[in-house]
Amino acid sequence: MTDTVKLKINHQEIECDQDLTILQAARSVGVNIPTICYHDHCTANALCRMCVVEVKGARTLVASCVAKVSEGMEVETHNERVTRSRKTILEMMLSTSDLSQSPELLEMASEYDADHDRFGDAERRSPALIDDNSMFVRDYEKCILCWRCVQVCAEDAQYAFAINFKGRGYHTQISTFYEKPLPESTCVFCGQCIGVCPTEALKPKRQWLLELGYESDQIMQMTRNERSKKTKKPQTSTAVK
Amino acid sequence: MNVIKNKPVTTTCPFCGVGCNLELHIKDNFIYKVTAPFDSVVNKGNLCVKGRFGYDFIYNKRRILSPLIRKTPQKPGARFQAFNLDEWREVSWDEALDYTAKRLVEIYQRDGSNAMAVYCCAKATNEDNYLLQKLFRALFRTNNVDHCTRLCHAGSVVALQKAIGSAAMSNTAAEIMETDVFIITGSNTTETHPIISIQMKAAIEKNGAKLIVVDPRRIEMVNYATLWLAEKPGSDVAVFSGMAHVILKENLYNKEFIDSRTENFQNFSKAMEKFTPEYVESITGVEKDKIIQAARLYANAKRGAIYWALGISQSTHGTDNAHSLINLALLTGHVGKRGTGLNPLRGQNNVQGASDAGAMPWHYPGYQEVDDEQSALIFEKAWNIEPGGLNRKKGLTTTEILSNAHPGGVRSLYIMGENPMMTEPNLNAAHKHMQELEFVVCQDLFINESGAYADVFLPATTFAEKDGTFTNTDRRVQRVRKAIEPLGNARPDWQIISDLAKRIEKLLGRPNSAYWDYSHPEEILDEFGTVVPSYRGIKYARIEKTGLQTPVVDENHPGTPFLYAESFPIGKAKFFPLDFRPIDEGADKDFPLILNTGRVLEHWHGGTLTRNSWLDDLNSQALVEIYPVDAETYNINHLDVVKVQSRRGEIVLRANVTQKTIAGVVFIPFHFAEAAANFLTNDALDPEALIPEFKACAVKIEKVTEDLLPTKQPYLPRGRY
């Protein structure tokens, strides 16, 4: 038997296991706290700050994906301070990254009434698409640095340690060491990273080619050289419905 | 750019025996992406490169989508390979099946059941395999039915059957997290069973489990190991008997378990007396201290588990090797509990299922012996055959089928999905045997090295175009779902077999039909369940979401995650006294190095699927691994082109100078037709299991000029090799 604690979430009194995070405790009583970098199968890192909540007595907002519950805690998950913070986070993300293929994020943006142009004059992060193998492409223009891919490449699943952060601050990007092509890294092409990517920044090559407008027959007729050759991203792409 | 959104189809991976659950994302009959469900008990959202990206063989332009008949009639002794489509004639299914039935029946009526033989397929479904062995047993009255299990785990299967009475993996892969000491031997787990290896890594890194690797290669798992016992190839019996010696001498054995659950302990412990650490060191090259440490670590474990693969079984004493592992588990009582066990990792998606389905020469479905009268009666009743109709004689094994291809022996061979011209040992001899056959049928996706010998080619569907079930390495029966419409004129294997069987039955004029009117694979599994008690409770409706682990004895049975909690299938488990025997062909003055063979991550067995996939871009040519000191001796630099020669054949490929192998041993993966390692391997057999010694033979190596290299692919550097 583990010990339990009593706390209030949105004024509702609950009793739960003392080892739960606030996020888990809230979910257990049907309160949905939005998350972005959090994934059930990755170690929580509190990077995106989307899951912040207000805890009575705490100076700052608290990331509920890592903060544990405690006796007598009073939590508010959707008050004005919290929603304003979430809205700003989404607006900052929208200003720097291409979220066009992240329906869940776009849905959150509309739910929180985020202004796509609030930081309209901000510099967009637009690194070139990396196409260095026949398995998948890496389009870090879409990356929101949620860290999930790095985690599953490391101790959360594969123990391959092929990717990590490079650069600092605004210039931070996921990369192999010394920016080597993936085949020359310790990558084993398990694609665990693709499985957890929330923004389609990582995309299987055949899906990518299909979305560029190639027919499946054309894709399968590509020679080894054609498919591993660096393909230029077209200016206008044919949308695939 | 819009995102494609369609509901994916869940199914089971067609590659290794782990049996990962897949979600196929499809647009207009084209699978463009594969993901894994995070709630899957098998792979928890994870996949390896083959499962994630390797399915594109389905759409490869070389895939055969129409039945074919050879233009030039093939004669025994003068049969030749035809890879080029110009040498084949496209025909209708009716013509192909009528022709096949006519030729097979002619041979059967002229030469009898001994002239007939079939290779079933560990890649095909349980239903496909059940039907194909039924066809050959019920209609051609032959037990010459086998599949690649003979070339994989036959040694393990025979030893496990003799010692405990069942050959399957005793525990569930998911229990790995509960194990505190692992032995991995003869398994390059990270490359051959990647999803099991990541669970092992987590158990080691997160739970503090200890790992002992016993292997002549410095495989990736050595990075996680407490001890690496770098044995000489083929010295497994000595290593594990040495550990048993230490456990006995230091009184670390489980007396209670031995008394209550085993027999023949006295004879066994006497036989272990000679395996002193000093003696073992002299045979195996493993320092005696490591033997002692390994013995203590394993014996003192709370939950010790042994995982092994073909490094143990593919040997002229493969059965003994497996016995030496079973002895260790019995000695310490590390079996019959969660997180422990004897766990042979199966290499193919459905090698467990194909074996369960009776694709073996000595057993009907469910391991019921063909020379046992009671078993024969069961199947005669089930298949509507007159009493005494089924053949009571054990059939020929995979390797024997080919070596018996001569007048008076095997005349026809039906191959479903296998590629013996890549996977048999001593390929030069195997090719000669194949050329002796009178009639060859191939049912496959591509004209591979074996299909090129066929008279008739029957294009089958892939895993994504048919329904059925696969049984994975930990005995879990899982659904395979039709996700896309079959391409071209390809047909599901079970349909091809039933249609052919009906034609054969008609030509034979049998009074009763064995029954072939299936409308869906589900009906075949139901029939399978009526004759195989361990599958009785498995129904499609029960395994829609999560597979069940056999035995599942009735429709309310929950399945069996780990075996032998109370007793062994044969009652008391048997210790086997062992003696050390060397490999069949040791190194000598003329052939001074030992060749070890195996797999790489990106490829799979005979290469029919993966070499026809974009996976080949990641690893497109064979490399021979050679230890730096040996490389210097033979004046070989990294990536030099070399010729490797054994007494049976020679191949030319690039050298990879690496410490991944040990001194005196070279390693070549066997997937690459243009430099097929099996031209070199030794076809000497284990006397009991009849498995060839793929893992050790004598070779020599010399540098040759670049122009002799058979592949024109440029070498692409890979960070992980």
Image (cartoon, coloured by chain):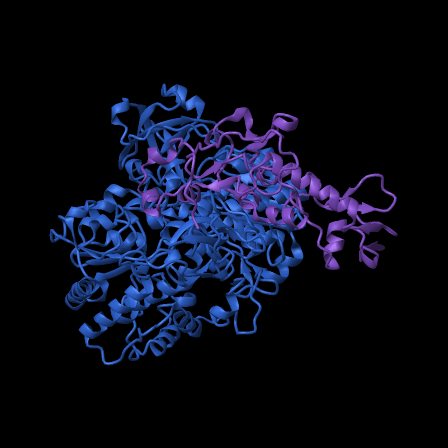
Chain colours: A purple, B blue
Please determine whether, in this image, residue B204 is positioned above or below residue B715. below
Left or right position of B518 against B320: left
Q: Residue at x 52, y 26 (%)?
A: A179
Residue B295 visible in the shown view: no
Image quadrant of residue B625? top left
Q: Quadrant location of the N terminus of chain A?
A: bottom right
From the viewer's side, name the closer residue of B540 and B567.
Answer: B540
- Residue A25 visible? The answer is yes
State the image coordinates of residue B646 (x, y, percent, origin top left): 30, 34
**Image position of B227 (left or right of B697):** right
Q: Nearer the viewer, residue A10 or B702?
A: A10
Seen in the picture, residue A177 relative to B600 is either above or below; the reply is: above
**In this rendering, position of residue B262 left or right of residue A90:** left
Question: How far from the left and from the top, in percent, is residue B313?
Answer: 43, 48
Look at the picture and state if B107 lies above or below B236: below
Question: Between residues B685 and B549, which one lies in front from this camera angle?
Answer: B549
Q: Residue at x 35, y 23 (%)?
A: B640
Residue drawn where x is 66% and y is 45% of the image: A38
> Could you say where residue A230 lies in the image, as x and y percent from the top left?
40, 31
Query: Along the horizontal axis of the image, is A14 left or right of A202?
Result: right
Q: Between residues B468 and B179, which one lies in front from this camera angle?
A: B468
Q: Position of residue B277 (x, y in %)?
A: 57, 37
